[in-house]
Amino acid sequence: MTAPLLTRLVRTLARPVSESEGLRARFHLLDWLACVAGARQTAVAAAAHRAGRDVLERVAYLGNVLEMDDVHRRALLHPGPVIWPAALSAAREAGGGMAMMLAGAVRGYEAMIAIGTMLDAYHYSLWHPTSTAGGPGAAAAAASIFGLDERQTVSALGHAASMAGGLWHMRHDDVMTKQLHVTRSALEGLWCARAARAGFTGPAAVLEGPQGLFAAMTQTPGPLLEPADWRIGDVSFKPWAACRHAHPVIDCALELRARGALNPPFVIETYADALRFCDRPNPVTEVDAKFSLQHAVAVIADGREATPADFTPQAIASLAALRAEVTVREGADFSLRYPRHFGARLNGLELIDTRGDPERPLDRGGLIAKLAMLVGWGGLPATEVDRAAALVLHGDDVGDIIALLTDWTA
């Protein structure tokens, strides 16, 4: 008899995490810290400071605010802002060191991505996968750090999957619900791992069961893939402050600009989901602008670099004329490659995969440059760049990371 999906998944999580995966996890931790730094002066940060009783709860609200958090293309979700608050919290509670936390984070990324890749296009049309798959991912990270056995870990993931949720409707309003989705997933996964550690048993077949997650939220769920390599290596970094669906267009625009060939009118061809989420010719809010293909092209055509400053109300107003020069349409060839590859064509220039993807990686220097830009945007002194990079890339004390975050959110 075949074991339930969560049992099979948990067995794959038991394999060793190597030093190379640990180093990769350090890069993702640094990237998440950059996103937190950049968001610290936003309205979300002000609300989080009032709502969060603990520093790791407060920063859990911030990792997704700027739309610069890491992303897995196939699973269509953002692991970093969910996994790192849960992993840091579990490590603080368990008294674990950096190696233990990094290994737990790698396992959390793996579980979250594995479940995300089983969710289908129907799910993505209504549900926010970072939220639905995030809870089990956070539970896996915490369970690893707590040293739970197989049955306890299955229970932790089962609890979290049984409470999965997060509707996309919040995209239709200028609200902060998306940040609540991310934070709930991180804290709920941590809570589920604590419950499993205490003896609360959970359902192993909650994904595929007759009244399980797939039955409720999908039409054609995919299989559980069990690759030999840890999937944290498949996660992309985001160099630009916009929805990931806008990044291929930004990349094309930058390439055309470098050639002196970025001239209106602008014709975008890309995959259907990019249009579904980001065809917004007349953005009003910062969120609208970050989810606007038209604004993305206008930003680059105006000589900007797609930093957070380029999506403010002031930038939205100043780029109206350039946005009006943009036409968007589906390119069937891009839709066929999606979601394994995100691509676009702008005024005839085609790019498949974009900067920050594993095929075109953002290296250590690129990540530190992103950190420096976001530290400045968040109003922190430049010395915090070196401090954060040293603690994350070379340090072994989880407490030092938490102290850094405490200083940033005081």
Image (cartoon, rainbow, N blue to C red):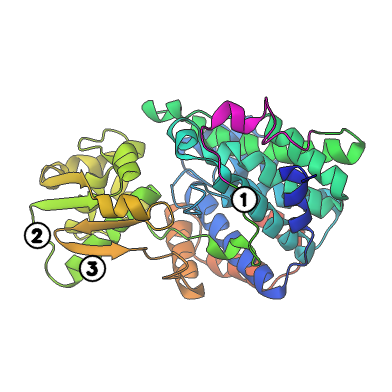
The Cα–Cα distance between marks 3 and 2, rounded to whole angstroms, is 12 Å
The Cα–Cα distance between marks 2 and 1, rounded to whole angstroms, is 42 Å
Between 375 and 14, the one lying in front of the other is 14
Q: Which amino acid lies under the numbered mark 3 shown in the image of this protein?
A: Glu
Report the residue marked by disc 2: 263
Q: Quadrant of the N terminus?
A: top right
* Residue farthest to the front, as pictured: 1
Asked if residue 106 lies in the magenta stretch, the reply is no
Report the residue marked by disc 1: 114
Q: Residues within 10 Å of mark 1 (few under 14, many from 20)?
A: many
- Residue 334 at x, y percent in the picture: 30, 54
Q: Which amino acid lies under the numbered mark 1 shown in the image of this protein?
A: Ala
Is there any visible trace of residue 406 in the rendered image? no
Residue placed at 52% from the left, 37% from the top?
220
- Kind of element beneath mark 2: loop
Left or right of 4: which side holds 137? Answer: left
Q: Residues within 10 Å of mark 2 (few under 14, many from 20)?
A: few
The Cα–Cα distance between marks 3 and 1, rounded to whole angstroms, is 34 Å
Left or right of 400: which side holds 30? Answer: left
* Residue farthest to the right, as pictured: 199
Asked if residue 207 lies in the magenta stretch, the reply is yes
Marks 3 and 2, the one that precedes in the sequence: 3
Marks 2 and 1, the one that precedes in the sequence: 1
- Residue 168 at x, y percent in the picture: 46, 30
- Residue 243 at x, y percent in the picture: 38, 47
Residue placed at 87% from the left, 32% from the top?
200
Residue placed at 88% from the left, 41% from the top?
197
Left or right of 362: which side holds 81? Answer: right
Between 99 and 66, the one lying in front of the other is 99
- Residue 174 at x, y percent in the picture: 39, 28
Which one is closest to the eye, mark 2 or mark 1?
A: 1
Question: What is the span of residues highlighted in magenta in the rendered image?
Answer: 203-222
